[in-house]
Image (tube, rainbow, N blue to C red):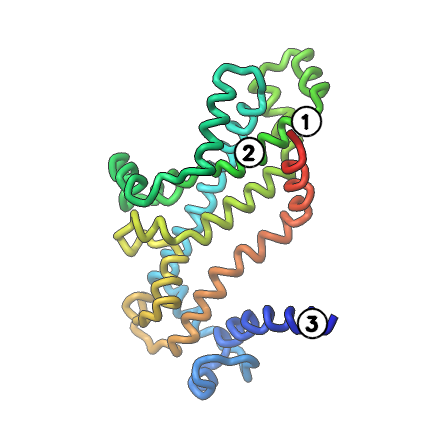
Amino acid sequence: MIVLGIACLLVVLPFVGIISTSLATPEQVIKAGGFVLIPEGIDFTAYRSIFIGGVVTRALLVSVFVTGVGTLVSLTLTAMLGWALSRRGSIGNRQLLLLVLVTLLFSPGIIPSYLVVQQLGLLDSLWSLIIPTAVSAFNVIVVRAFFVGLPQEVMDSARIDGAGEWQTFRYMGLPLARPVLAVVGLFYGVSYWNAFFNAMLYISDSSKWPLQLVLRTYVVDGNQIGAQALGTDTALPPQTSLQMAILVISIVPVLIVYPFLQRHFAKGMLTGAVKG
């Protein structure tokens, strides 16, 4: 119990320090040498500075768009492909399933991927952050396993009532698959939100950078955040405060969404993992 408590404390303390530093007064941050564990007062100057309308605000809007649209596109394609692969005996089912499984073992590589995106005319487009990673083979297999495990009697009853394949998928398959789709959607959403490597490859216009690339540039690489980049001509708080504020903004959305999907997590993953 003591060891577990110490481990939890070691995990929580960095997050507390990040939030405290982003909310501490500039004087306290300078006095503490850049990292504050317990702030003496609350100061939102760092957050006001990055939300004025500069690079961080634009990056946040880009990340929201990419995550929202990307998750919707990925869920739609994954659910439809998972359903198609679960219909045993359909034309090309085995060949298509083999093609999906092969992608789990072999990746195309950076250069071929870049050439494909270039040929499609997606360079410097936000769609280059969505389309190349729109479908995950692992998630498709999980969704397929769920659909394979559905009672055949349910499918037969829908067909007896005159439902076609699309109606069966829409009105029977999708409602029953909500737990596994919630989990897969969480996987896709977190992946899109945290992705920065594709932006490094395909996006050269800094106005289209996602938040994680801004985080890497100004926090991980340690580049200075100037007033011009933030779109202001006023004095800025210490760089550490700005960096910690950006870090908090990049973490909070996932922490907000996760509790709403947590109840589906165990059920969705176990159901998709042990069937078929």
The secondary element bearing badge 3 is classed as helix
Question: Where is the N terminus found, in terms of image quarters?
Answer: bottom right
Residue farthest to the front, as pictured = 105
Density class for disc 3 (Cα within 10 Å; few <14, some 14-19, many ≥20) is: few
* Camera-side residue of 28 and 75: 75
Q: Nearer the viewer, mark 2 or mark 1?
A: 2
The residue where tag 2 is placed is 141
> Which residue type carries mark 1?
Leu
Q: Nearer the viewer, mark 3 or mark 1?
A: 3
Name the residue beneath numbered marker 3: 3
Rendered view: 16 above or below 109: below
First of labels 2, 3 by sequence position:
3
Image location (x, y in percent) of residue 76 = 50, 33
Query: In the picture provided, is 68 more to the left or to the right than 201?
Result: right
For the C terminus, the image quarter is top right
Residue that numbered label 1 is attached to? 150
Residue 133 showing in the rendered view: yes
In x, y percent, where is residue 74? 48, 37
Q: Residues within 10 Å of mark 1 (few under 14, many from 20)?
A: some
Whole-angstrom CA distance, mark 2 to mark 3, is 38 Å
The residue sitting at 69% across, 11% down in the picture is 160
Of residues 25 and 148, the one nearer the viewer is 148
Q: Residue furthest bottom?
A: 31
Q: Disc 2 or 1, which lies upstream in sequence?
A: 2
Residue type pointed to by label 2 = Ile
Residue drawn at x 51%, y 33% is 78
Q: Report the residue at 48% width, 27% height from top.
A: 98
Q: How far apart are the two marked residues, 2 and 1, measured between alpha carbons?
A: 15 Å
